[in-house]
Image (cartoon, rainbow, N blue to C red):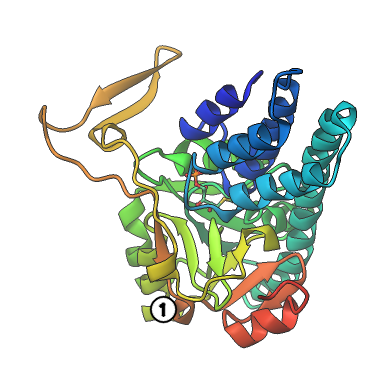
Amino acid sequence: MRSVDDVYEAIENMTVRGAPLIGAAGAFGLYLATLEITSQTNIREHLSNAARYLISCRPTAVNLSWAVNYALEKLNRDHSPASLSGTALDAALEICEMEKEYCRQIGNHGLKLIESLSEKKGGAPLNILTHCNAGWLATIDYGTVTAPIYLAHDKGIPLHIWVDETRPRNQGAKLTAWELGEYGVPHTLIPDNTGGHLMQQKMVDVVFIGSDRTTGSGDVANKIGTYLKGLAAFDNNVPFYALFPSTSIDFSIRDGISEIAIEERDPEEVTTISGFANGIIESVRICPENTAAANYGFDITPARLITGLITERGICKATEKEIKKMFSDKFK
Ligand code: MRU
């Protein structure tokens, strides 16, 4: 990516995706904006336009606006045109380090939970169900959902992961299955509609999902289909945890359903499916021509369905009181 437009396009077409990763990419976009400055440029206007443009790219994950605004604030405090690029690059790299560290900490906290759940299994694998991809490929490193999974696997705790395929873009099938396979974590790919059945049959011990935006009261916006997993888990008394860094919390809002914008994407992602054919990625239509399709990217799982939130600061209940206690310095 060599320009702000390249970054916009990569985020929009999901070459780069996953909440923490699009945040970091957005910050690098602002760095590229500083490289576009000439002697004719109105610098402040140029940078704030670039920031607004990058943020407008995908509306749901709050990490994008958080990271771009974080870098922009640093730039606004730098009054020397000669050092702007260095300032922006430092901010983007700092965000990467921050996100890595947050994921590492999420891993440590989640590991303790996995250890205690695993003790009750008497040596049998702990079955974790996950939706979409909240792994390396959605973050900078470790992942959010995958960080404790990798640590537990390293410690020899027997695990088995149910991987939702996650239509329409199939991040579960394409990305999570690939990551877990590379790491040697046992897993099984399932169609999105299978989770409820597995929970009724006691084949899921815990659900781990990521988040693209969590409200100050614990409602979680995550990949479309997460809400249905939350309902099924609640009905079957299966613990349901959301794992995410504080950069995915929107401390300024309380009601996920009315306050979080849900991205709507091209219906073609629903009417077609892509996969490998003879080593190349091909796309085929799965419905009659001209079929109308709706493509909502995310949904809201209300806090009442969530057992706990796992962030870099530890595990807390999905309530305003507990989130406030854990993040008193960030709460608005
Ligand atoms: O549309 P995507 O692929 O960018 O969606 C993001 C996700 O993968 C998830 O919803 C994820 O659980 C949160 S990002 C770690």
Q: Quadrant of residue 268?
A: top left
From this view, report whether residue 63 is shown above or below residue 78.
below
Who is closer to the viewer here, 107 or 204? 107
Q: Quadrant of residue 62?
A: bottom right
10 Å crowding of disc 1: few (<14), some (14-19), many (20+): some
Who is closer to the viewer here, 156 or 331? 331
Residue farthest toward the bottom in the current orientation of the protein: 321
Determine whether, in the image, residue 11 is placed left or right of residue 135. left
Residue at the disc numbered 1: 234
Residue 254 visible in the displayed image: yes
From this view, report whether residue 108 is shown above or below residue 288.
below
Which residue occupies 10% across, 30% down?
288
Which residue occupies 69% across, 34% down?
30
Specify the quadrant that holds the C terminus: bottom right
Q: Position of residue 168 (x, y in %)?
A: 34, 41
Residue 143 visible in the displayed image: no
Q: Position of residue 65 (x, y in %)?
A: 60, 50
From this view, report whether residue 122 is shown above or below residue 166.
below
Which residue occupies 71% across, 59% down?
148
Which element carries disc 1, helix, strand or loop?
helix
Who is closer to the viewer here, 194 or 73? 73
